Amino acid sequence: MRTLVAGWFSFAGMGATAGDLLARDVVCGWLREAGVPHDVALDPPFAGGVDWRAVDPGAYDRVVFVCGPCGDGWPLTEFLPRFAGRRMVGLDVSMLDPLERWNPFDLLLERDSSRTARPDLSLLSEAPPAPVAGRVLVHRQDEYGDRAAHAEADALVDALLADAGLAVVPIDTRLDRNATGLSTPAQVEALIARVDVVVTTRLHGLVLALKHGVPAVAVDPVRGGAKVLRQAQALGWPHALPVDAATPAALREALGWCLRPEAARAAAATAARARRALAPVRAAVADELAGGGG
C-alpha cells in the first residue's frame, strides 16, 4: 500500500506557493526515510506526480494533505470524499473552521487551528536556494544604430537566464525613468551588490557588478562590440562578448564559470586592479585643479 501526498499543488489555479512545495518536500523526505512508498498528487503547472482524479483510491491506505488553509469548501469537498476510507492526515495546515465544527483528519498536526499553533514545516527544508542573477539591460541607444542588435542581445540574455534555473532580479540603472522602482545610485548598487551574478548589456551593469565583487556576463548589444566590450577589455574581464559572437553555448559557458566560487574572487581582484589603474587619472585631475597644465 502507498501514501498519497496532496496539497494546494494538487489543484490547478489554487495558488500553490513556494512554502507549500517546500513543506511537501519535507514530508516526502520523511516518507522516504521511513521506507514508505508514496505518490504526490500534482496539477499543472507542476509535473512529475499523479492526477488524484485518475488514480485508484484503493491503491492508497493513507492520504497526507500538506500545508495551507483548509476549510469545508471546494475543492476539498470533492477531494476528500474520493478518498473516503483512507486514513487522512493533515500536516502543517491552517484550519479555517473551529475543530469542533469541521475536522476531516484522523491525525491532525496543524500549523494553526482553534486549539493550537506550530511553526511552519518549511523551516525544516534543506534544499539550497537558487543563485540570484541580476538582469541589467540597456535601453535602446539610437546613437549606436542597429535596433535589431539590441533586441537580439536582450533575447540572448533572457534565453540564458530562462534556462539556468536562477532567481532573476531585474535591475534598471537608468534613473530619470526607472523601470524597477529605483531612484538613487545607492539603491541600484544595493541590489547589484547582493546578487550572485549579473548578466547585462549595459556598461555600468558590468562595472558596478565587478566593483562589488560580483561576477558578470556582458553582451555588448552593438555588432562587433562598442563601449561595453571596450570596457571589459580595459578591465581585463574576459566574460564579455559582442552580440554577433554571443552564441548560447558561449554564454552558458561564461555563466557557468561566473557561478563558481573563484569567480567572485576574480571579480574583486579585477575591481582592485581597475582602482589602481585610475590613480593617474585622479592625479591628473588634481594637477589640473591646482593650476598645472602638464
Image (tube, rainbow, N blue to C red):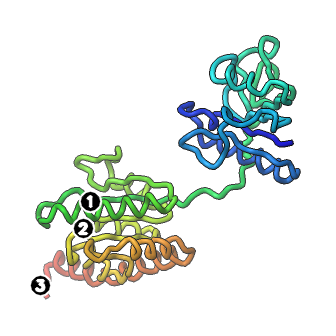
- For label 2, the residue is 221
Quadrant housing the C terminus: bottom left
Front position among marks 1 and 3: 1
Mark 1 falls on what kind of element?
loop
Q: Give residue 221's quadrant in the image.
A: bottom left
The image quadrant that residue 23 belongs to is top right
Q: Earlier in the sequence, mark 1 or mark 3?
A: 1
Q: Where in the figure is residue 3, as x and y percent of width and height?
A: 81, 41
Q: Secondary structure at mark 3?
A: loop
Badge 2 marks a residue whose secondary structure is loop
121 is higher (above) or lower (below) than 241:
above
Within 10 angstroms of label 3, few (less than 14), some, or many (20 or more) residues?
A: few
Quarter holding residue 185:
bottom left
148 lies left or right of 17: left
Any mark on residue 293, and which? 3
Q: Residue at x 47, y 75 (%)?
A: 268
Give the quarter of the figure containing the N terminus: top right
Q: Residue at x 45, y 55 (%)?
A: 168
First reached walking from the N terminus: tag 1 or tag 2: 1
The crowd level at tag 2 (other Cα within 10 Å; few <14, some 14-19, many 20+) is: many
Name the residue located 82 percent from the left edge and 29 percent from the top edge.
88
Amino acid type at mark 3: Gly
Q: Residue 138 has which mark? A: 1
Q: Position of residue 235 (x, y in %)?
A: 34, 80
